Image (tube, helix red, strand yellow):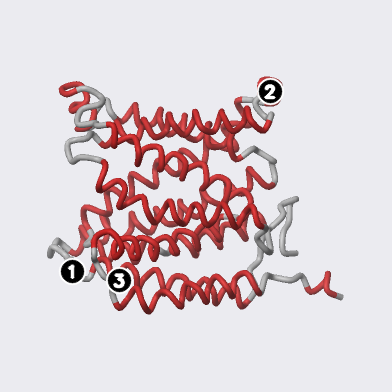
């Protein structure tokens, strides 16, 4: 069976899902440039992240009120259901982010970026384990092409940065192992979100609200001992903010809602295609606004991404029993 346990694995994207995917690709691609231009170096990272989560909750609640799902929330919502659907993925994502921060300090950006792309494979793996969604041979080939493209884009981005000659044991235990574990956790959390939305019929907007609240609570607890917490106490929450700072914050919040919609309707694997495609968008925007031409790696990766998306869409897995 292509799908099991009541999960409907999307074989082809409808117009609405395609629209969400295009918007998310553009948002992901433009976010680095928007953040670079609008967020000053003195802005405390935790303040922008927490504000982003608050904006995300507000936007999701407005959308829930608009589609009428907010009215029945008081009767249908349960703490256990919320913890199962959103609490676990949110906790996993929090642990993943911590591991990424650890590994980033011990690896050069090139090695980090390449190893981080393995999350695409782990997403496909956990989607099969949890949702029983199989991939056709052509789709597996498409995933390989996608990872090749991601590696090429990472090489192009990090080729000018060399490793810092740290201890090999430190690289292994504080660099390679944490980023690989983070990739496994990313695939698991993405598959759990897809399971919650497709099997448990948990609204993507509600999941966004719940995961933002859990993530914010984890971040607030971390400020008790973190340098950002000390900076907020010393300088104030909005230190270094300007009116333009809200632009990337709102953009990132809307991107978070789009991630939920794409994962819910198209699945975590296709979200991986969106993220890699966004790397190309970033390269094109850098050329358009900063005059930085795309690297040769980027030009080689472009047809790989297009081919992988085309293959994945054109050759979905077909159950042989159903075909007979």
Residue at 22% across, 35% down: 43
Q: Residues within 10 Å of mark 3 (few under 14, many from 20)?
A: some
Q: Which residue is mark 3?
A: 294
Q: Where does label 2 land, which residue?
A: 71
Front one among 89 and 9: 9
Instruction: Specify which label sits upstream in the sequence, 3 or 1.
Output: 1
Horizontal and vertical percent for residue 290? Answer: 24, 60
Residue in view at x 64 percent, y 44 percent: 197
Which image quarter: residue 202?
top right
Residue found at x 38% / y 79%: 300
Q: CA distance from mark 2 to mark 1?
A: 54 Å
Q: Are the residues tagged 2 and 3 within 8 Å (C-beta)?
A: no
Q: Measured along the vertical axis of the image, is residue 142 above or below residue 203?
A: below
Q: Are marks 2 and 1 in contact (CB under 8 Å)?
A: no
Residue 244 on image: x %, y % = 29, 36
- Secondary structure of the residue carrying numbered label 2: loop
Disc 1 on helix, strand or loop?
Answer: loop
Q: Is residue 319 above or below residue 68?
A: below
Distance from label 2 to label 3 (Cα)?
Answer: 49 Å
Q: Earlier in the sequence, mark 2 or mark 1?
A: 2
Give the residue number, with chain letter if any, for mark 1.
160
Mark positioned earlier in the residue sequence (2 or 3): 2
Q: Does residue 228 sit above or below 262 in this rendering?
A: above
Q: Quadrant of the N terminus?
A: bottom right
Mark 2 vs mark 1, foreground winner is 2
């Amino acid at each position: 069976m292509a799908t099991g346990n009541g999960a409907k694995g999307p074989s082809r994207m409808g117009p609405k899902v395609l629209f969400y995917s295009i918007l998310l690709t553009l948002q992901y691609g433009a976010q680095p440039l928007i953040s670079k231009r609008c967020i000053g170096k003195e802005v405390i990272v935790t303040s922008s992240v927490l504000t982003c989560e608050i904006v995300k909750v507000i936007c999701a609640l407005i959308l829930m009120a608009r589609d009428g799902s907010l009215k029945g929330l008081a009767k249908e919502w349960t703490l256990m259901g919320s913890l199962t659907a959103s609490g676990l993925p949110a906790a996993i994502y929090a642990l993943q982010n911590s591991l990424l921060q650890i590994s980033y300090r011990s690896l050069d950006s090139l090695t980090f970026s390449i190893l981080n792309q393995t999350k695409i494979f782990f997403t496909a793996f956990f989607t099969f384990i949890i949702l029983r969604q199989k991939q056709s041979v052509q789709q597996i080939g498409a995933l390989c092409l996608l990872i090749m493209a991601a590696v090429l884009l990472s090489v192009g981005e990090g080729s000018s940065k060399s490793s810092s000659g740290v201890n090999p044991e430190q690289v292994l235990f504080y660099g390679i192992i944490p980023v690989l574990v983070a990739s496994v956790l990313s695939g698991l959390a993405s598959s759990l979100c897809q399971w919650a939305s497709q099997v448990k019929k948990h609204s993507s907007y509600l999941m966004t609200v719940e995961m933002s609240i859990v993530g914010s609570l984890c971040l607030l607890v971390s400020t008790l001992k973190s340098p950002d917490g000390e900076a907020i106490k010393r300088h104030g929450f909005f230190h270094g903010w300007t009116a333009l700072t809200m632009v990337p914050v709102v953009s990132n919040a809307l991107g978070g809602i789009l991630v939920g919609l794409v994962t819910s309707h198209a699945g975590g694997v296709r979200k991986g295609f969106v993220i890699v495609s966004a790397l190309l968008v970033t390269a094109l925007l850098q050329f358009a606004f900063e005059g930085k031409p795309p690297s040769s790696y980027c030009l080689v990766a472009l047809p790989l991404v297009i081919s992988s998306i085309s293959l994945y869409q054109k050759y979905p897995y077909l159950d042989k029993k159903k075909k007979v």
